[in-house]
Amino acid sequence: MLKTSALEPVDYLLIGHITKDITPTGYSLGGTATYAALTAASLGLKVGIVTSIGSDLELPQRPGIQVHSVISDTTTTFKNIYTPAGRIQYAYHPAAWLDLSAVPEIWRNTPIVHLGPIMQEVDPKLARAFPNSLVGLTPQGWMRSFNAEGLVHYTDWPEARYVLESAQAVVFSVEDVRGDESVIEEMVSSIRVLVVTESSAGARLYWNGDVRYFRPTPMEEVDPVGAGDIFAAVGSCPFCDSTGFRQRNPTRSRGNSHRRRSESWFNYNSPVIWNL
């Protein structure tokens, strides 16, 4: 493990790779762990991240977020290409596997645990490793793989029922399942709360099998990367009880819209940040 200062208890634990994202202007931080952690911290939660990165990635020092990392020779790297036909992704240099041995003891009873795989790096058994926690999922990384050239493609998720039956809520995009409604319906039968985001069209919420649709205020899209992760983090707040979850969906849709509209909003000028 990387040497860190003494860890403190947190409210919100993320498990998944922080990534290097290739952009036209260089590298930026990415991955569900990045976007969801920044969002949760901005909402006032104490955040912990269990991840794996290589020595090639230096994380900025930011208060409010603690990071515990498994040593790796490489850092998971992504390249996103947006076309009129949809997004094309490439993935390179996957970092280390994350299982229960990677999670510090002090974080194993965190109130909210968010499993956020981005490329098959999170052990599905972790869904059943936190009996005292609310376990939320953004499972996109269990539904994709990549070929020898790094091209990311959809893959089946054989552990889906096992994982979903152990969690309290799941968020993924209609793109993650290639628009296959049969996959969505199968998942709905395994979990109480399921959210499917639909890009600029908003989202649908399945609550004990009942479905509700939420449409956001139209906004100019600046950068869609991470919008679903922000959405999931807001929805996982401890005050989202069975009533609040429904009432707050419009707010989360607006948050998603603001991600699309404003780069400055996502630069987190507020004191939200990493603490190694």
Image (cartoon, grey):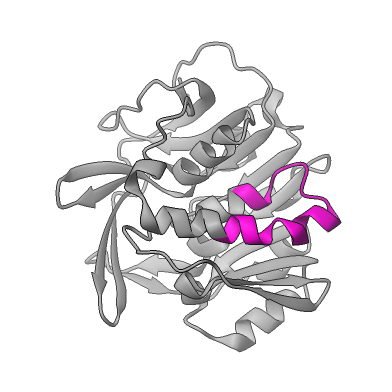
Quadrant assignment, res 205: bottom right
On the rendered structure, is 268 left or right of 66? left
The residue located at (36%, 50%) in the rendering is 262
Residue 237: in magenta span: yes
The residue located at (61%, 82%) in the rendering is 183
Quadrant position of the C terminus in the picture = top left
Q: In the figure, 249 relative to 212: above or below?
A: above
On the rendered structure, is 55 left or right of 258? left
Q: Main secondary structure of the magenta part?
A: helix
- Can residue 70 be seen here? The reply is yes
Q: In the figure, 34 relative to 117: above or below?
A: above
In the foreground, 8 or 243? 243
The spot of residue 88 in percent (x, y) is 28, 71
- Can residue 125 be seen here? The reply is no
Residue 98: in magenta span: no
Q: In the figure, 179 relative to 110: above or below?
A: below
Query: Which stretch appears magenta?
Result: 234-253
The number of numbered badges drawn on the structure is 0
The spot of residue 128 in percent (x, y) is 75, 50
Q: In the figure, 47 relative to 129: above or below?
A: above
In the foreground, 257 or 63? 257
The residue located at (83%, 51%) in the rendering is 241
Question: In the current view of this chain or complex, which residue is farthest to the left?
Answer: 25
